[in-house]
Image: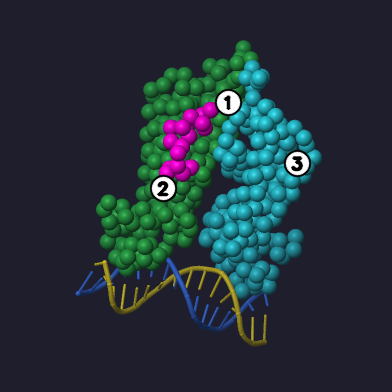
Chain colours: A green, B cyan, C blue, D yellow
DNA sequence: CCTACCGATCGGTAGG
DNA sequence: CCTACCGATCGGTAGG
C-alpha cells in the first residue's frame, strides 16, 4: 500500500464514522502518525479525498451497467445482472461505498452537479431495463422513475448491514436482493396475459 | 408561527440543502434577518435544533407503529397499515423527515446512542409483523432483519423524490409502496401450500 | 434583540 | 516529513 492509499483508507474510515465534516486533516494526521502539513505531500486537499472516492465508485457502477445492458437481452436477465453488478461493486469496498452514498452531498458545487448528472444517467440505464420489461409484458406496468429509485435504495441499504467478513457471500446477497426485488417487479404467472 | 418555529423551519431548509455542518448560526441569522447572538434567545444551541427534529419524528413513527400493531391482526393488514403510517409521517413534513433520515449521525454521542436504540426498536416492531406473516404462511420465509432494513430503505426513499405540491397524494404513495413491497413479501397464490 | 467579543479549530501554505 | 504560522470561521457568552 502506498502512502497515499494508506491515507485514503484511514480517511474513509473516519468519514464513515464521523462524516465528511468530522474528517479533519489534523485528525487524519494523528491516525497516520504524522503532522497535518505532511499530508499535503500526498493529497491535494480534503475535498480531493472525497472527490476521488466518489468518482471511482461512480465509474465502476457506470461501467458495470453499460456492460450489462450491452450483453444481455431479456429484461429480467438484464435486471438480475444489473443487481448483481451493483451489489458486487458496493460490497467490494464497503467504506468507499458508504462514503459514496452518504457524503457526495459535501462535494464542491461543480463536482456535485456533475455527480448528480452521472447518477441520473445511471438511473436512466436502470429505467431502460424496467421499461423493456414492461414493454415485453414481463414486468408490472409501473412508473419507472419511482420504481428505480425505490429499487436502488433497497440495494444501497446493504452498506448499512452487510458484513464482508461474515458468512454471506456478495453473490448470495445479490441473489437474495434480486429475489426480493424481482418479485415486486416481475409479473407473477397467473397475472400474465 | 412563533419565532422559534420560524427558526426551526429555516434551519431545516438549510440542513436539507447543506447538511448539519452547512448550517451555521450566522447563516441562519441572516435568513431570519437578525444577529447570530439573538438566535440564542429562542434556541439553546445548534445541537438542540437537530435533536428536537430527530426526536419529534422518531416519536411520531413509534406512536404509529405501536398503534398499528395493537389494532390489526393479520400480518398483511398490519404491514399495509404500517407502511401507510410511515409514509404519512414522512410526507407530512418533508424537510424534517429528510433531516431525520440523513443528519441523525450528527447528533451528540449520548443522543445518537439513544436514537439508534429507538430505531432498533422501531425496526423490531416491523420484524414482528414480517415474522407473523411467515408464521401464518402468508409471507415468504426470509430473513426478517434484512427484509425490514430493505423495506424501510425503500420507504424512506420517498424523501428523495416525493413532491408534496404535486398530483400524488400521500395515501396514493402509500398504496403504491405497499403494492410494490407487498409483492416482494407476500406469497403469490400458486406458491401457497 | 444588538454590540462586542472569546477561545477553539479549521484547511492550507512557506520554507526548509 | 516537520516547524511555524496565517486568515477565516465557528458556536457561544457577557452585558445591556
Residues in magenta, as a range: A162-179
**Is residue A26 placed above or below B155 in the rendered structure?**
below
User: Was residue B8 drawn as part of the magenta stretch in this picture?
Assistant: no
Q: Quadrant of the C terminus of chain A?
A: top right
Query: On the image, numbered disc 2 is attached to which residue?
Result: A96
Q: Are marks 2 and 1 on the same chain?
A: yes
* Mark 1 Cα shell of 10 Å, populated few (<14), some (14-19), many (≥20): many
Q: Residues within 10 Å of mark 2 (few under 14, many from 20)?
A: many
Are labels 3 and 1 assigned to the same chain? no
Q: Which sits earlier in the primary sequence, circle 2 or circle 1? A: 2
* Contact, mark 3 vs mark 2 (Cβ under 8 Å): no
Q: Does the magenta-highlighted stretch encompass residue A171? A: yes
Residue at image x 52%, y 61%? B21
Residues at marks 3 and 1 touching, judged by CB atoms closer than 8 Å: no
Position of B101 with respect to A47 (left or right) is right
Chain of the residue under label 2? A
Circle 1 residue: A183
Element on which disc 3 rests: helix
Amino acid at each position: 500500500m502506498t502512502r497515499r492509499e494508506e491515507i485514503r483508507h484511514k480517511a474513509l474510515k473516519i468519514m464513515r464514522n464521523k462524516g465528511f465534516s468530522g474528517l479533519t486533516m489534523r485528525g487524519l494526521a494523528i491516525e497516520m502518525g504524522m503532522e497535518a502539513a505532511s499530508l499535503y505531500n500526498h493529497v491535494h486537499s480534503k475535498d480531493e479525498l472525497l472527490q476521488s472516492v466518489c468518482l471511482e465508485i461512480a465509474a465502476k457502477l457506470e461501467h458495470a451497467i453499460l456492460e450489462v445492458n450491452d450483453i444481455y437481452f431479456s429484461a429480467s436477465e438484464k435486471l438480475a445482472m444489473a443487481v448483481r453488478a451493483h451489489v458486487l461493486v458496493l460490497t467490494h469496498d464497503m467504506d468507499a461505498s458508504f462514503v459514496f452514498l452518504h457524503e457526495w452531498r459535501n462535494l464542491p458545487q461543480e463536482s456535485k452537479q456533475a455527480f448528480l448528472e452521472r447518477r441520473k444517467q445511471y438511473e436512466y440505464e436502470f429505467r431502460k431495463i424496467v421499461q423493456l420489461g414492461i414493454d415485453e409484458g414481463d414486468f408490472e406496468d409501473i412508473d419507472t422513475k419511482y420504481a428505480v429509485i425505490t429499487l436502488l435504495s433497497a440495494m444501497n441499504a446493504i452498506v448499512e448491514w452487510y458484513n464482508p467478513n461474515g458468512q454471506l457471500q456478495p453473490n448470495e446477497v445479490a441473489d437474495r436482493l434480486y429475489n426480493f426485488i424481482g418479485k415486486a417487479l416481475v409479473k407473477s404467472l397467473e397475472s400474465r396475459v
